[in-house]
Amino acid sequence: MHQGRTDQQSRAQEDPTIMLTLSDLMWEPEVNWRADAACSGINSDLFFPPGDDDPSPEQTRKAKEICAQCPVQEACLQYSLATNQAAGVWGGLDAGERRRMRRRIRDRERRRAS
Ligand code: SF4
């Protein structure tokens, strides 16, 4: 049986927003996925620096490396988008990347609706 990825799956690997829609942003958040989080037991300061400090590029890189190995990365990212998490690394993306992802999803949905 052919196990290759579809074109859409390949494109989604490069740009995860392809698979997301506005309804995903309004998705009813669940938190069951947290039990399988790769960051469980890791100092949360790596993902969420204390105070108002932005994470250093090195912190962000290390956090993203952990996310890249995480079995619940997609659920984590979806949760962060649905609940509009403004800080830290979620689902392998930093705050700026998530803001841009939300903007791209909304822009695409507006174009579809017009
Ligand atoms: S994707 Fe990253 S932040 Fe989210 S649960 Fe996994 S390791 Fe933690």
Image: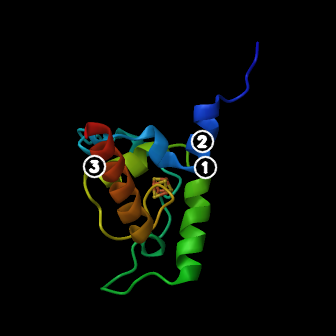
Callout 2 crowding tier (Cα within 10 Å): few <14, some 14–19, many ≥20: some
User: Which quarter of the rendered picture does the C terminus lie within?
Assistant: top left
Q: Nearer the viewer, residue 106 or 32?
A: 106
Q: Is residue 33 visible?
A: yes
Query: Is residue 67 rendered to the left or right of residue 114?
Result: right
**Numbered disc 3: secondary structure:** helix
- Decide if residue 2 is on the left or right side of residue 76: right
Instruction: Indicate left or right for 49 with 31 as reference.
Output: right
Give coordinates of residue 77: x percent, y percent. 41, 51
Earlier residue among tags 3 and 1: 1
Quarter of the image with the N terminus is: top right
* Horizontal arrangement in the rendering, residue 69 relative to residue 88 (left or right): right
- CA distance separating discs 2 and 1: 5 Å
State yes or no: discs 2 and 3 in contact (Cβ < 8 Å): no
Instruction: Return the mark for residue 11.
Output: 2
Instruction: Write down the residue under mark 1.
Output: 14
The label shown at residue 82 is 3
Q: Position of residue 103 (x, y in %)?
A: 34, 58
Up/down of 103 relative to 3, above or below: below
Give the vertical position of 48 relative to 40 (above or below). below
Query: Residue at the location (54% across, 67% down)?
Result: 63
Q: Amino acid at mark 1?
A: Glu
Q: Nearer the viewer, mark 3 or mark 1?
A: 1
C-alpha span from label 3 to label 1? 21 Å
Q: How is the image coloured?
A: rainbow
Q: Percent position (x, y) of residue 43?
A: 47, 70
